[in-house]
Image: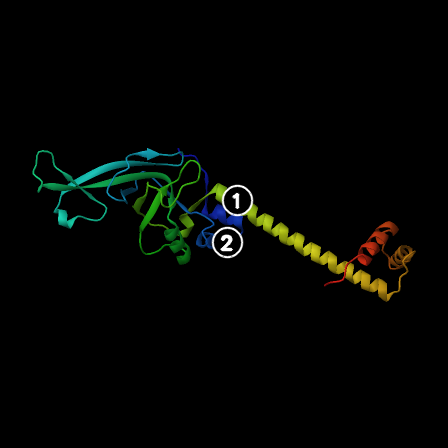
């Protein structure tokens, strides 16, 4: 059983807040998309004609099998290699193709992921480029282990590495907090400017103004703030530097 380090599409939507957030993150390259394959999914190797053998990580595994057939060298398919038959002459050759059975989680190429995100679901073609998910999460779309898989995919079937989603969630929270802090600072400065203007309009004296304001608040039915807080607020408002 492979270690689950991935969130489903719906789990990712729940964490990022909306389907459109996930879609835009895929389109922008901020969120890598993965597919989950099982042992019944057979694919053939996509590369330069050299097999990579069997392999596995904590998140996936691939197993190679070779298939041979006699073929005219001039009619070879792209990505296949010609192997000379032992004991035969140079003109008698066969085509050897590497096939792989993939199991577990594989990284979907960025272009394929974007195509699915743009289509809001299944797209017409079914050949996708995949890279094995590595243990450390630093896999690349251009890794040597690269496969071409004939599978049917849609946006809701994609998976996303939990560490990527957590990072996006933390970044979004930090951005929102910074925005909230910025809004709060601007609002506070606006209040202080208004207080300063009202103090000038009311011709409040430099000394004893806090007691007068507190008395008026009590007349209006407010029990706070008290004298000390009012004095501090008035002092802060009077200390504001004019806008340049």
Q: How is the image coloured?
A: rainbow
Q: CA distance from mark 2 to mark 1?
A: 14 Å
Image position of 238 with respect to 134: above or below:
below
Question: Which labelled disc corresponds to residue 21?
Answer: 2
Question: Which labelled disc corresponds to residue 167?
Answer: 1
Q: Which element is circle 1 on?
A: helix
Horizontal arrangement in the rendering, residue 89 relative to residue 4 (left or right): left
Q: Is residue 97 visible?
A: yes
Horizontal arrangement in the rendering, residue 46 relative to residue 223 (left or right): left
Q: Name the residue: 85% across, 53% down.
A: 230
Q: Check the image and name the residue furthest to the bottom.
A: 201
Horizontal arrangement in the rendering, residue 41 relative to residue 221 (left or right): left
Exactly how many numbered labels are in the figure?
2
User: Which comes sooner in the sequence, label 2 or label 1?
Assistant: 2
Could you say which quadrant of the image residue 41 lies in? top left
Could you say which quadrant of the image residue 213 lies in? bottom right
Q: Name the residue: 37% across, 52% down.
A: 112
Question: Which labelled disc corresponds to residue 142?
Answer: none
Horizontal arrangement in the rendering, residue 49 relative to residue 187 (left or right): left
Residue in front for this viewpoint, 179 or 42: 179
Q: Looking at the figure, which quarter contains the C terminus?
A: bottom right
Residue in front for this viewpoint, 111 or 99: 111
Image position of 12 with respect to 87: above or below:
below
Report x, y in % for residue 211: 91, 55
Q: Name the residue: 56% across, 50% down.
A: 172
Could you say which quadrant of the image residue 49 lies in? top left
């Amino acid at each position: 059983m492979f270690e689950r380090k991935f969130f489903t599409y719906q789990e990712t939507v729940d964490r990022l807040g909306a389907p459109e957030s996930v879609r835009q993150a895929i389109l922008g390259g901020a969120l890598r998309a993965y597919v989950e394959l099982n042992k019944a999914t057979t694919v053939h190797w996509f590369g330069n004609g050299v097999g990579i053998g069997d392999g596995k990580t904590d998140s996936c595994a691939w197993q190679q099998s070779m298939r041979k057939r006699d073929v005219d060298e001039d009619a070879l398919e792209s990505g296949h290699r010609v192997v000379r038959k032992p004991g035969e002459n140079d003109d008698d050759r066969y085509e050897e193709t590497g096939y792989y059975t993939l199991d577990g989680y594989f990284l979907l190429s960025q272009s394929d992921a974007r195509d699915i995100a743009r289509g809001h679901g299944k797209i017409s073609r079914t050949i996708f480029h995949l890279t094995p998910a590595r243990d450390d999460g630093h896999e690349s779309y251009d890794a040597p282990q690269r496969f071409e898989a004939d599978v049917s995919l849609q946006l809701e079937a994609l998976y996303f590495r939990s560490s990527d989603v957590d990072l996006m969630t933390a970044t979004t929270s930090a951005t929102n907090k910074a925005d909230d802090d910025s809004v709060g600072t601007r609002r506070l400065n606006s209040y202080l400017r208004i207080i300063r203007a009202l103090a000038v309009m009311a011709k409040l004296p430099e000394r004893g103004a806090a007691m007068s304001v507190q008395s008026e608040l009590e007349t209006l039915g407010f029990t706070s703030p008290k004298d000390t807080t009012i004095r501090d607020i008035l002092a802060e408002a009077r200390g504001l530097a004019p806008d340049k």
